[in-house]
Image: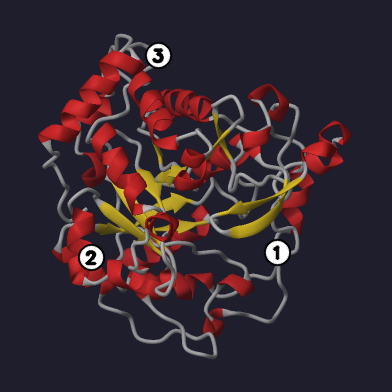
Amino acid sequence: MESEQTNRSPQGTGRRAVLGAAVLGAGGAVLGLPGAAHAAGTRTAAQGGRGLKSLPKPTIIGHRGTSGYRPEHTFGSYDLALELGADIVEAGDLVPTKDGHLVCRHEPEIGGTTDVASHPEFADRKATKLLDGVSTTGWFTEDFTLAELRTLRAVERIPANRPHNTLYNGRWPIPTFEEVLQWQDRRTRELGRQVWIYPELKHPTYFRKLGLGLEERVAKLLHKYGKDGRNSPVIVQSFEPTSIQRMHRLIDNPLVVLLSSADSRPYDFVETGDPRTTADLVTPKGLREIAGYAQGIGPTLDLIIPKKSDGTLDKPTTLVRDAHKVGLVLHPYTMRNENPFLPAEYRKGSAPDGYGDAFGAFRTYFATGIDGVFTDNADTALLARADFLGG
């Protein structure tokens, strides 16, 4: 990280303290790093460390675990990401259940990521809803209790690109965020190194309107497990800037604003009538504003290097330089090995599950100066980083 933000407002700190005392309480599991004793309710050892500055660069972030090799957002995917050497595991796209628990799914609609369609007892739960203004049909986590979701099993989301992952369909249940925090502590002890996670708040405006606000629930669990500090090994991200602003008032963790295509508008902007698009947010003015409440941005790779009409890469934008000027780190998304996800010049053949020249693509993106990258294939990314750094 170029310049870690430490200037939390007194108002934000005060609100977090009040929340901790009045709502959240103390206690819960804490990290047990080798050679250090930790009492319940204490802060993690990592909070006294260097935080984001301690991470290697470019940082390799296991996207939903290692979803190139296992169904995403399962402990099978998360564990493999660690075993392959990912610096951070994106453990948790967070969505709520009907009874207010946080679970890890790519989207609240779970027809494509679980075996819910094969459960006749849940056939009547299929519904069509407006999700961020888009008509979506399927089964939604907010219509299930946690106990009901525990009867389901995860399946591969994109089997046409990853037929090998279907071998693992049905093997793992849906994790809760609390289980992820416990897993983080256990794996930190077992590996003898700090495990980092990178949860995302999914559709926070949508869920707040349903009475299932995400921010307070996430803050409550981070506080319970002593992971709500500036140097905590938990980076919180969202596509909605106002959600990250809300988190800024509740916790001191590193925060990241995710950015979609240049012509898109964050859904919280749509709801509040804010006319700005992502293109406005990546201007020097927009980046300065983000730097006032967040430590980084997570842009799509196309905001780093746009594509020409034929799908090949054009010239890099100034986003990396502009973000670094205001002290923001950049963790763009998402590098995948399969042909359809690579720039056209790095594809090899047209097979939807065939690998292209991912190493060449990684080298090109690393050369822009990005601080890290989300990837479905952590092992490929680590080899590409070693090549890039001359290791």
Residue sitting nearer the eye, 112 or 330: 112
> Circle 3 is placed at which residue position?
28
Q: CA distance from mark 2 to mark 1?
A: 36 Å
- Could you tell me if residue 85 is visible in this image? no
Q: Amino acid at mark 2?
A: Gly
Instruction: Please state if 111 lies on the left or on the right of 92 as rendered.
Output: right
Is the residue under label 3 in contact with that under label 2 (CB below 8 Å)?
Answer: no
Q: Amino acid at mark 3?
A: Gly
Is the residue under label 1 in contact with that under label 3 (CB below 8 Å)?
Answer: no
Q: CA distance from mark 2 to mark 3?
A: 38 Å
Quadrant where the image shows the C terminus: bottom left
Above/below status of 291 relative to 44: below
> Circle 1 is placed at which residue position?
161
Q: Which mark is residue 286?
A: 2
Quarter of the view holding residue 362: bottom left
Q: Amino acid at mark 1?
A: Asn
Residue drawn at point x = 32 percent, y = 12 percent: 26
Residue drawn at point x = 11 percent, y = 42 percent: 7
